Image: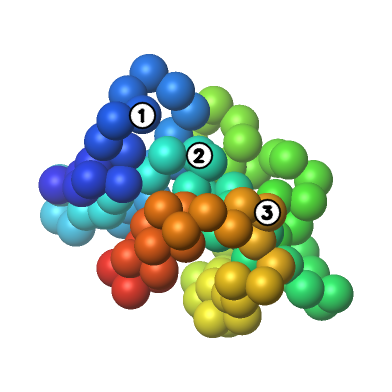
Amino acid sequence: MIDESFYDGYEGVNEVVVYYNQDSDKIGFKIWNGYFVNLLSGCYNIEIHTDGLLICYQNQDGFYEEQGWRIKNIDVVISELENYSDNHIESQSSVMLTMLWIWLYYW
């Protein structure tokens, strides 16, 4: 099942779907691209790994493409997400920060 609660209200605009296959079911979530981009900007730091999410954010490839894209190294991605800081994100609105914290908790 794909949880769409982080995409509610943004139907028809860009989204990112993160999932894994369990048997024949897709388990994951759909998130509005605006939340996802701001989340990644909050994780950005000087050290970028070639097999994480931040390199794709910087180069605008990988998950920016229309076809499916696989996370190359889940440990690197988790480490990048753990480096999240509100001080680095592009949007400081309280709504955006609340949704990002909820998403990080969910992740």
Residue topped by disc 1? 10
Furthest-front residue in this view: 94
Q: What element carries label 2?
A: helix
Q: Distance between the residues labelled 1 and 2?
A: 9 Å
The picture quadrant where one finds residue 85 is bottom right
Nearest to the observer: residue 42 or residue 25: 42
Nearest to the observer: residue 78 or residue 86: 86
Q: Distance between the residues labelled 3 and 1?
A: 19 Å
Q: How crowded is mark 3: few (under 14 residues within 10 Å), some or many (20 or more)?
A: some
Q: What element carries label 3?
A: loop
Q: In this view, does 90 lie above or below 31?
A: below
Residue topped by disc 2? 33
Q: Earlier in the sequence, mark 1 or mark 2?
A: 1
Rendering coords of residue 1 (x, y %): 14, 47
Nearest to the observer: residue 85 or residue 45: 85
Task: Locate residue 25 relative to residue 15 in the image: left or right.
Answer: left
Residue topped by disc 3? 90
Q: How far apart are marks 2 and 3 (CA)?
A: 13 Å
Q: In this view, does 27 lie above or below 49?
A: above
Any part of residue 71 in sight: no
CB within 8 Å, label 2 to label 3: no
Task: Locate residue 88 relative to residue 29 in the image: left or right.
Answer: right
Give the number of the mark in front: 1 or 2: 1
The picture quadrant where one finds residue 100 is bottom left
CB within 8 Å, label 3 to label 1: no
Kindly identify the residue that appears in the image at 57 percent across and 42 percent down: 63
Q: Name the kind of residue labelled 1 in the image.
A: Tyr
